[in-house]
């Protein structure tokens, strides 16, 4: 939240059938942090459970980022 890309981000812009746009970037600007800190929960008591979700709809085992996603989950 609040991060920005500085410099040039370029590539073909596609309009998809669901009404959204996808930029297939061939060049990406530098990421500048907006300063938002990662959220965390307080430690749970013995009778409490913490639940989290992770969107894996487009997760692909052949993607170079797969291992990094796995580390974040486990």
Image: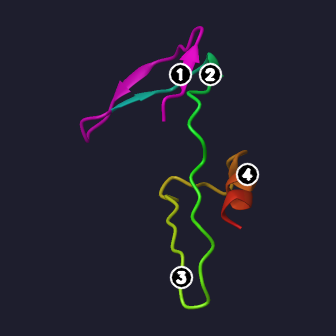
Given residues 62 and 44, the one toward you in this image is 44
Q: Which residue is under mark 4?
A: 68
Earlier sequence position, callout 1 versus callout 4: 1
Earlier sequence position, callout 4 versus callout 2: 2
Placement of 63 over or under 6, stated as above or below:
below
Given residues 44 and 58, the one toward you in this image is 44
Mark 1 to mark 3: distance in Å?
35 Å
Mark 2 to mark 1: distance in Å?
5 Å
Q: Which residues are magenta?
A: 1-20
Residue at x 59%, y 67% (from the top left corner): 42
> SS at mark 2?
strand
Q: Which residue is under mark 1?
A: 4
Q: Which residue is under mark 3?
A: 49
Given residues 3 and 72, the one toward you in this image is 3
Residue at x 26%, y 39% (from the top left corner): 17
Answer whether residue 6 is magenta in the image: yes
Looking at the magenta stretch, what is its main secondary structure? Answer: loop
Nearer to us of marks 1 and 4 is 1
Earlier sequence position, callout 2 versus callout 1: 1
> Is 56 on the left or on the right of 64, as rendered?
left
């Amino acid at each position: 939240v609040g991060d920005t890309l500085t410099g040039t981000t370029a590539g073909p812009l596609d309009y998809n059938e669901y009404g959204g746009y996808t930029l297939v970037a061939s060049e990406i600007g530098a990421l500048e942090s907006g300063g938002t800190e990662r959220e965390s929960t307080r430690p749970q008591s013995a009778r409490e459970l913490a639940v989290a979700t992770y969107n894996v709809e487009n997760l692909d085992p052949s993607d170079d980022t797969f291992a990094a996603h796995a580390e974040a989950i486990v």
